Amino acid sequence: TAETLFPYTTLFRSLQTGIFHYLLTNNKKIDVNKAAIIDSSTGIATTYGQLIEESLRFGHGLTNVAGLKKGDTLLLYSPNSVLYPILLFAGQVSFLLEAGRFNGRGADLLAQAAGVTVSTANAGYTAPELAHQLHDSSASVVLVSSDVVGIARAAAKEIGFPEDRIYVLPGSDGKLVTEGLKSYELLRGDDGFAPVEFGEDELTTSVAFLPY
């Protein structure tokens, strides 16, 4: 079995803030116009500023459009894409970002916690495999790539999961095919909203990611 070099409690209690805030408060003063993610197939880059702003916008949408609240589970069923890390961070938006901490876009945005658990699903899953994770994780909302939307619909039908809780992302070719379901674009919310914070106990007990 794998072992950590640090005691469990030391490793995790060393983080006194949420994941989003810990990773993206820009203490090293990285230029927000610098590329953070590059799509290898198109060469299109997402800057640090765009990563921050889009994560905040989708965090707002997950809370205010999809109705997720702290403690809920969001299931993400998609191949890798530039949008993938944005949605992962959107689920973890947790603390007020102090005005001026970012030298550029997103400098004065307030981060309202979606504060949800993000459960990632293997993009190669069959409908029964996805149905198991959907039920086992108690997911409230599903984000699914256009590449596998048919499988997601079949999985939802198998366990009686409501289709109006499924939002469709672009496929690996960049095209959005919703097949009558909701578009992820509905979740791109406002850029100004009140923050929700985790308490000290919640930081050490709340589940951030639930991969299968």
Image (cartoon, helix red, strand yellow):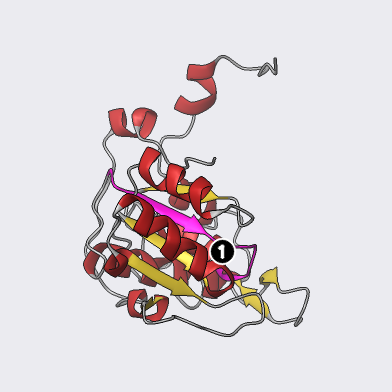
User: As rendered, which of 126 and 119 lies closer to the eye?
Assistant: 126
Res. 201 image quadrant: top left
Confirm whether the magenta stretch covers residue 73: yes
Chain part drawn in magenta: 71-83
Q: Amino acid at mark 1?
A: Tyr
Question: Can you say which quadrant of the picture contains the C terminus?
Answer: top right
Is residue 40 visible in the rendered image? The answer is: yes
User: As rendered, which of 61 and 142 lies closer to the eye?
Assistant: 142
Residue occupying the point 29% across, 47% down: 72
Location of mark 1 (residue): 84
User: As rendered, which of 131 and 120 lies closer to the eye?
Assistant: 131
Left/right of residue 28 with respect to residue 130 in the rendered view: right
Res. 30 image quadrant: bottom right
Residue occupying the point 54% across, 78% down: 170
Confirm whether the magenta stretch covers residue 119: no
Is residue 97 visible in the rendered image? The answer is: no
Q: Secondary structure at mark 1?
A: helix
Residue 92 screen position, x and y as percent: 41, 52
Residue 177 screen position, x and y as percent: 50, 83
Vertically, is 140 above or below 59? above
Tag count = 1
User: As rendered, which of 172 and 85 lies closer to the eye?
Assistant: 172
Residue occupying the point 33% across, 50% down: 159
Residue 36 screen position, x and y as percent: 66, 67
Mark 1: few, some, or many residues within 10 Å (few <14, many ≥20)?
A: some
Left/right of residue 154 with respect to residue 115 in the rendered view: right
Res. 156 image quadrant: bottom left
Left/right of residue 148 with respect to residue 108 in the rendered view: right
